[in-house]
Image (tube, grey):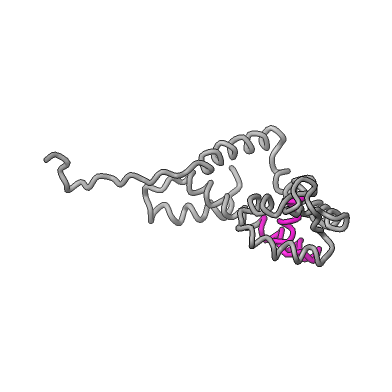
Amino acid sequence: MQQRDATDDHVDRWMPVLPGLDPDVEGVVTRAIRLARHLRRVKERYLLDFDFQRHEFDTLHVLAGRRGRATPTELAADLDMAPPSVTARLDALERRGFVRRIPSTTDRRRVDIELTDAGHAAWLGAMEVLGHEDHRLLDALDPTERRTLADLLRRVMIVAEQPATPATPAPDPGVDDEP
């Protein structure tokens, strides 16, 4: 018999309340939400050990992913934020010595943000610790299962990344559509 988790109990509670509930859809969505919460809690707890707030780490992470150099506008786009909101983050990271502003080599009006050696080291140290939890969780699957899960989640995310169309309301059974 397969081991049960808290989501199984959640679905069991809701089935009598919502008889049309698809237990597989509810199970997947609930597990995804709970997994995201778990990873967020673990990340925040570990980041405290590195004296990072989540938004600071996220900014360094995006910058590292751009090979250590980007414009504030590029960072804002990657972080899904308004460009002025990124300025305060960059100010704080610059005060900590994790980033520096340097004049652009291509446009005198522009400033690039560069990850310093200290910023890279701090980001990398946190990444190593955060990666342990990812591996701990996904070690429950063999490599083939991990690949299958990655492929299935990709298919779902492709749909999620498309604009949603409004749901068409069901016709009112008491109304005759014919004139």
Left or right of 18, for residue 32? right
Q: Residue furthest front?
A: 108
Position of 124 with respect to 173 (left or right) is: right
Q: Position of residue 65 (x, y in %)?
A: 75, 46
Taking the magenta stretch, the answer to whether it contains residue 150 is no
Give the residue drawn at x 75%, y 46%: 66
Residue ranking furthest to the right: 117
Of residues 54 and 63, which is closer to you in this image? 63
Q: Residue lying at the far top in this picture: please name it.
A: 144
Quarter holding the N terminus? top right
> Residue at the left extreme?
179
The segment highlighted magenta reads 39-63
Residue 156 lies in what quarter of the image?
top right
**Residue 3 in the image: x percent, y percent?**
61, 47
Is residue 62 inside the magenta stretch? Answer: yes
- Residue, x 79% and y 66% (percent of image)? 51
Q: Is residue 133 visible?
A: no
At horizontal 64% and vertical 38% (from top left) the residue drawn is: 150
Question: Which of the two residues, 152 or 9, is positioned nearer the viewer here?
Answer: 152
| Main secondary structure type of the part rendered in magenta | helix
Q: Could you say where residue 62 lies in the image, as x and y percent from the top left?
A: 72, 51
Q: Can residue 69 be seen from the camera position used here?
A: yes
**Residue 133 or 21: which is nearer the viewer?**
133
Q: Is residue 144 above or below residue 28?
A: above
Residue under the image location 48 percent in, 49 percent down: 26
Quadrant containing the C terminus in the rendered view: top left
Count of labels shown?
Answer: 0
Query: Is 81 on the left or on the right of 174, as rendered?
Result: right
Q: Is residue 8 left or right of residue 149?
A: left
Rendered location of residue 25, percent (x, y): 48, 45
